[in-house]
Image (cartoon, coloured by chain):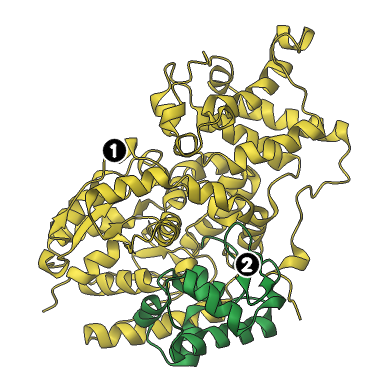
Amino acid sequence: MQVDDRNIEFDSDGFMIEPALWDDAVASAIASEEGIDEMSEEHWRIVKFIREYWLENGLAPPVRMMCQEVGVGLRQIYKLFTAGPARGACRVAGLPKPDGCV
Amino acid sequence: MSKPREGNEARPQRGVDEAMGAEQMERAAVSALNEAVRGLGAYHMNACVKCGLCGETCHIYRADPTPENLPAVKADKVMSFYRRYHTLSGRIAPFLFGARSMTPEVLEDLVDDVYGRCTCCGRCGLHCSVGLDIASTIVTGRRILAATGKVPADLQAVVKNQLETGNQMAITQDELKSTTEWIAEDLKLEMDADVQIPVDAVGKRILYLINPREVKFFPLSLLAAAGVFHAAGEEWTLSSRFYDVTNYGLFSGDQQAAAAITRQVMEEAEALGVEEVILSECGHGFRAFRWEGPNWLGESYEVPMRSVLDLLLEYLDAGRIQVDPARNEARVTLHDPCNLVRWGGVSEQQREILQRVVSDFQEMVPNRENNFCCGGGGGALSMSEYGEIRVGSGQTKVDQIKKTGAKIVATPCHNCADQLLDLSKQHKLGLDIQSVVELVFNALVLD
């Protein structure tokens, strides 16, 4: 994927191979692949929270924290990210694929 | 700035046994092979007539019809070991009879075939002209690779999580409790009733096992189940330690791990004093716990076990819950998870339920035990390196879904749900993937 003049690479699951290259422009580009034409303020708040949590803890936050910390309802998050919190929101936040059945 | 992947530092890389020498590896491999081919296993290893009929039955071959994707070709790589170690001709003149020794290189070469290009869905076996259980031959390959430390690292990490933390996503007990409390609060508002999600309650009728995905990323199915249990007046509990309905030992081929995972859950069921264990909608979890578990343990369970689909149908039959199909107006189709339906024998329950809770139910064709795998089975979702094959092999399923005209796909399996979500995204289908219990919950009529 070309973002500005950078070549951003993904694993065959669509998650960033080099998460350190992530920034707002990359997030917007991945989001557009997710069918999100324009990141709303709610999208950004969720994505930024996931990103910060991951930088601190080295793993993806549970959806409970995404909702409670950002103040969105559970059903709302699946509308914002139709691929769900893992393959949708975590991917936009530039995380590697979370472990397990997701 | 770049952080390691979850649990990376402790993650065993492929070949935990780098130290295992070639001879030692061959011994371990032969021992795994011998164990797998006892009894009828030997027939399945040495009777393929190379008719090629299995090709069109396989979702992976259909998406990419190269010879190496033919089920018979994949399975023959495992069968070649049988010929080498169990037939006179293969022992004397291996090169004449396509018999291969299990050298480190040969075993390494098998990894992509049995983990990456087969989901062990079993559809080929159903159509095999001589009735071979081809998928189980592939599983024999996985058992050999598990015995020699060659399970793909991501898949092995899931098994390790299960053994070390009790659940495949390494969710802490505190997090489970926080999440269940949070969902219960939501549910109280949605149902306008004092709904609880009991955790570690002793002496309830049911221990409900769930997929950790329902805790970490997709709690709507747990919310729905709790809502339906409340409406039916059920006495139930979750366990904070061993609630995981999955068993990735089934996928990795490590039967010792699979047995240990089964044992920890069944001991918990006995400790909690429940009358029965109910398995949430998880295809391989049902197969592993309901059918394989007693074989792994070498004994039958003390506590009986059923799928939640049986329970939901029982509620409907007994009038313990009231539903109105008009609440689910949109057309719904049903994807049959291979491990639940073809391997597990649970086929009619989900249909009878859907007929009663949705207004417009449209079967996809083929269905039931003849359904096509979605492409996400066999642990494929956990192995990133095979992502392209996985998504590509979903083409048959995409075509099936499109023909139904449905925008909602019900599937009683969280693993299939993830794959179907991915397919929906890749093909821009705009599908809504729901578990059966979510549709039941949505149709509930409360007094």
Which residue sits at x=27%, y=70%?
B229
Q: Are marks 2 and 1 on the same chain?
A: yes
Chain assignment, label 1:
B
Above or below, B250 against B181 in this view is above
Total numbered badges shown on the rendered structure:
2
Front in this rendered view, residue B321 or B282: B282
Q: Quadrant of the N terminus of chain B?
A: bottom right
What kind of residue is marked 2?
A: Thr
Which tint is chain B?
yellow
Instruction: Name the chain letter of the residue that bears numbered label 2.
Output: B
Q: Nearer the viewer, residue B191 or A27?
A: A27
Q: Give the residue pinned by disc 2.
A: B165
Question: Does dot 1 land on a helix, a strand or a loop?
Answer: loop
Q: Position of residue A101 (x, y in %)?
A: 52, 60
| Image location of residue B111, percent across then percent down | 68, 40
**Spot occupied by residue B367 in the image (x, y as percentages of width and height):** 28, 40
Q: Which residue is mark 1?
A: B366
- Structural crowding at the residue carrying mark 2, measured as other residues with C-alpha within 10 Å and reported as few (<14), some (14–19) or many (≥20): some
Secondary element at tag 2:
helix
Eyeballing the image, is B345 above or below A63? Answer: above
* Residue found 46% across the figure and 27% down from its top: B55
- In the rendered image, residue B407, in percent from the top left (x then y), is placed at 26, 60
Q: Is residue B321 above or below residue A72?
A: above
| Rendering quarter of residue B231 | bottom left
User: Which numbered disc, 2 or 1, marks the residue that appears first in the sequence?
Assistant: 2
Q: Colour of chain A?
A: green
Image quadrant in which you'd find residue B23 = top right
Q: Could one spot residue B75 in this view of the protein?
A: yes
Q: CA distance from mark 2 to mark 1?
A: 39 Å
Marks 2 and 1 in Cβ contact (< 8 Å):
no
